[in-house]
Image (cartoon, grey):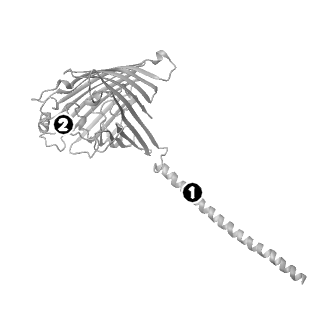
Amino acid sequence: MKKLFVCFTMLFLFHPSSVQADRIDDLEQKIEVLQKELKTIKEDQMERTRLQLESGYGEFSPKTEVGGYMELHYNDTVGGDNSTTDEQLDFHRFVLLFNHELADWIQFSSEVEIEHAFIEGDEKSGEIELEQAYADFLTGEHLNYRAGVLLTPIGIINQHHEPATFNGVERPFVDTVILPTTWSESGAGIFGNLLPGLSYQLNIMGGLEAEAFSAATGLRGGRQKAFKTNLEDLALAARLEYKGLPGLAVGASYYTGDSAQDLDVDGDVNVEIYEVDFRYTIAGIDFQGEIAQVDIGDAEKLNTILGKTSGSDAIAEELFGWYLEGAYHFLPLINRTTSHDAALFLRYEDYDTQKTMPGGFAENPAFDRQAWTFGLTYRPIPDLAIKVDYQDRKNEAGTAEDLFNLGIGWEF
């Protein structure tokens, strides 16, 4: 009986342990399976993340660059009461740049701008604008391809208009009313280097709209800005630039294109632009200058169809302007080791949006203008400029008013 009790006791003690061990083994196998599944899920997630980063989808990748620039301006009329610029403080523009390397030979660039800080439906306020959005196909030193929304390669300022790159709070008048900076349009083109130091650009783009030309601001209103661009008339824009000598850059631009579009005018209203410019730096002194001429064909017929009969609104056959600027970087005289920069500058401009009128149309002397702009540009760092200037403006009608300008602009 005692032996039987011992047997039952042993059976009772060891049998559950065996069952427990089997259960533990089963749990360990399940845990191992779960660990393998989790590892697979993690590896899949890491692979998806890697692909997203490489493609630029989902997050910014090392191949994506974000930048921008912005300007805050104060403008005040001196000796007059011009309501548009009298004691006015304006956050003139806020611009974001997004660039991405789609492949080692395909680069995407874009520029989105908000002007005057506030957008309100159909009200006349600020505006948001896509200034650039194009892809570069880099196939070699001498020949590359570009397509999208492009800045027209005309003049100094149009393609390089960041606030720290030029003197003066406002852009030069020649680059505002003679050459309509900033001027972008849908199109395609080629670019590259012809010789060491000599580069070129050649674009086929949507043309201007002659219906929106004006006597005061010339071609500026005729920019289609890539908004449902009317392709009835195309245009060609070209630029050569030489930078083969230290401190020197010389450029020449040409534009030609009909601009009648769908306007029922007896003519094509062909627009031609001729422009040359230079920039030269030596011993802390900068010089730069620009000459631009615009010829408008069939201007007489255009004025007739648009009902522009007086000198105050008639469009000219020829617009012409030029400027010359000098700047002296004087801080090294005060502190040779400073990393800051400050330059005193002086610019003279002569520009006339009614240089030559078509037969039977009188010019308005108010549009034959001159301006002296002098001031200071201070850069505590290269990408930030604090500017102050005074503009002594004249016109042949004696109605021009002077301006005092103060501004800050920065880029990143």
Q: Amino acid at mark 1?
A: Glu
Residue 353 in picture, x, y percent from top left: 21, 28
Position of the C terminus, as image quadrant, is: top left
Image position of 137 with respect to 395: above or below: below
Residue 107 in picture, x, y percent from top left: 41, 43
Is the residue marked by circle 1 packed among few (<14), some (14-19), or many (20+) residues within 10 Å?
few
Q: Which mark is residue 43?
A: 1
Query: Residue most toward the bottom?
Result: 1
Front residue of 245 and 53: 53
Label 2, secondary structure: give it: strand
Is the residue marked by circle 2 packed among few (<14), some (14-19), or many (20+) residues within 10 Å?
many
Q: Which mark is residue 270?
A: 2
Seen at 54% across and 56% down, the residue is: 45
Front residue of 283 and 142: 283
Position of the N terminus, as image quadrant, is: bottom right
Callout 1–callout 2 Cβ contact below 8 Å: no
| Residue 257 appearing in the image | yes
Q: Which numbered disc, 1 or 2, marks the residue that appears first in the sequence? A: 1
Query: Alpha carbon of mark 1 to alpha carbon of mark 2: how far?
Result: 62 Å
Location of residue 288 by image quarter: top left
Query: Residue most toward the left?
Result: 360
Label 1, secondary structure: give it: helix
Location of residue 322 by image quarter: top left
Seen at 63% across and 65% down, the residue is: 33
**In the rendered view, does 118 fall on the left or right side of 229?**
right
Q: Amino acid at mark 2?
A: Asn
Residue 199 in picture, x, y percent from top left: 35, 33
Q: Which mark is residue 239?
A: none
Seen at 30% across and 45% down, the residue is: 121
